[in-house]
């Protein structure tokens, strides 16, 4: 009895140590997981390059890995380049603003608010002086230096992340079984079969999930791009792509995408001023219709059927992940929960709660 308790205590301590290690090295583990995902995406390119023969000899897998990485970088560059015209249009729109008129309007608004604050005695001599003090605090030297420091830190972190991900992705592309061998190597012999089952089942479900996300992004992009193009919005394709990508963030992503899109629609409108509000309203209707289609048709199919979980179950998991990890937690909620269900089904099968949560995973 005592020996059994000792083994359980050792197991619990080991799990806690592993969890703490994962937390400490969470960034590196994140890079590793992204690299594994990119290696799956680039595997068809590596296989295609391997079929090319020069003087009867196949090209080494390292060449295929480099070609796949080049494809990733070129695709990323093209996507970034697509935003160039949109940024230029926004710059032109800002340059065309009548700053003197805006300043006059602001001066009038400040005077009105100043009068109201004096009458209500809100604790400031005047709103204008309060606004001046607040602006001085915001644009002070300390804030500017902090801003530049944050920018440099962000650039440094981004460089390290990109380099690490590309470096690890190269080796995962070069050796298709590298990740599998790493997992098996750190697994006790008694658990190897369980880990093999977990990897096979999780690969099946996560492949279905991520392929479904691609379909979801495509549907949202096409619907919004087509709708905005019909009502005459500039850069409709880019706005649709932005909405599709942001739609990957559950619940708040579509709202952010719509707000960004409507702001750009409002600032790039160049026709008669009388049609400005109807133009924005038409764009808003397109975003609304797309979101309704996504909420009631696309998402239930992708998040429920693809990972074999109840929609209410998915909603609760995403909400809890959002409370714990913010936007990042919401994005990782469904794939993380899917992996946990696969692990629980393999090691904790027979428990009432686990069986209830994983019963749909047995359906084909």
Image (spheres, rainbow, N blue to C red):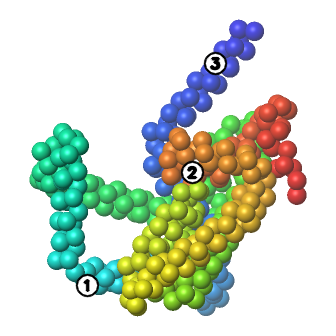
Q: Are marks 1 and 2 in contact (CB under 8 Å)?
A: no
Residue annotated with mark 3: 9
Residue annotated with mark 2: 330
Q: Work out whether mark 1 precedes mark 3 in sequence or the reverse, and give the earlier one.
A: 3
In the shown orientation, is residue 112 left or right of residue 129? right
Q: Looking at this rendering, what residue extends furthest in the top direction?
A: 2
Q: How many marks?
A: 3
Q: Closest to the observer: 258 or 352?
A: 258
Q: CA distance from mark 3 to mark 2?
A: 33 Å
**Residue that appears at 64% across and 72% down:** 289
Task: Name the spot of residue 287 as percent of width and height, x first.
Answer: 58, 72
Task: Name the spot of residue 295 as percent of width and height, x first.
Answer: 68, 62
Q: Work out whether mark 1 precedes mark 2 in sequence or the reverse, and give the earlier one.
A: 1
In the shown orientation, is residue 142 left or right of residue 315? left
Q: Looking at this rendering, what residue extends furthest in the right direction?
A: 363
> SS for tag 1?
loop
Quadrant containing the N terminus in the rendered view:
top right
In the shown orientation, is residue 322 left or right of residue 270? right
Residue annotated with mark 1: 96
Q: CA distance from mark 1 to mark 2?
A: 39 Å
Q: Closest to the observer: 96 or 298?
A: 96
Q: Looking at this rendering, what residue extends furthest in the front direction?
A: 119
> SS for tag 3?
helix
Q: Work out whether mark 3 precedes mark 2 in sequence or the reverse, and give the earlier one.
A: 3
> SS for tag 2?
helix
């Amino acid at each position: 009895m005592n020996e059994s308790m000792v083994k359980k205590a050792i197991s619990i301590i080991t799990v806690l140590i592993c969890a703490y290690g994962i937390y400490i090295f969470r960034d590196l583990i994140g890079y590793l997981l992204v690299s594994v995902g990119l290696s799956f995406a680039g595997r068809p390119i590596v296989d295609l390059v391997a079929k090319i023969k020069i003087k009867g000899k196949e090209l080494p897998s390292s060449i295929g890995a480099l070609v796949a990485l080049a494809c990733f970088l070129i695709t990323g560059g093209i996507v970034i380049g697509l935003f160039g015209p949109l940024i230029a249009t926004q710059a032109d729109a800002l340059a065309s603003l009548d700053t003197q008129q805006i300043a006059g309007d602001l001066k009038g608004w400040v005077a009105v608010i100043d009068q109201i604050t004096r009458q209500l005695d809100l604790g400031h001599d005047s709103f204008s002086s309060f606004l001046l003090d607040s602006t001085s605090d915001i644009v002070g030297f300390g804030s500017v230096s902090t801003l530049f420091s944050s920018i440099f830190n962000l650039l440094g972190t981004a460089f390290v992340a990109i380099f690490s991900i590309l470096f690890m992705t190269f080796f995962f592309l070069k050796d298709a079984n590298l990740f599998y061998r790493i997992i098996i190597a750190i697994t006790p012999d008694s658990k190897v079969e369980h880990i093999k089952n977990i990897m096979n089942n999780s690969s099946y479900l996560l492949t279905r999930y991520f392929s479904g996300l691609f379909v979801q992004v495509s549907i949202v992009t096409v619907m919004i791009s087509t709708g905005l193009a019909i009502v005459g919005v500039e850069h409709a394709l880019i706005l649709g792509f932005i909405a599709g990508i942001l739609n990957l963030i559950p619940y708040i992503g579509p709202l952010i995408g719509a707000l960004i899109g409507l702001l750009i629609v409002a600032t790039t409108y160049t026709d008669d001023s009388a049609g400005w509000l109807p133009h924005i309203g038409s764009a808003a209707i397109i975003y609304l219709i797309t979101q309704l289609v996504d909420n009631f048709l696309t998402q239930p199919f992708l998040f429920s059927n693809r990972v074999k979980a109840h929609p209410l179950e998915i909603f609760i998991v995403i909400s809890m992940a959002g409370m714990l990890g913010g936007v990042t937690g919401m994005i990782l909620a469904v794939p993380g929960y899917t992996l946990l269900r696969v692990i629980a089904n393999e090691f904790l099968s027979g428990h009432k709660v686990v069986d209830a949560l994983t019963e749909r995973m047995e359906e084909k």
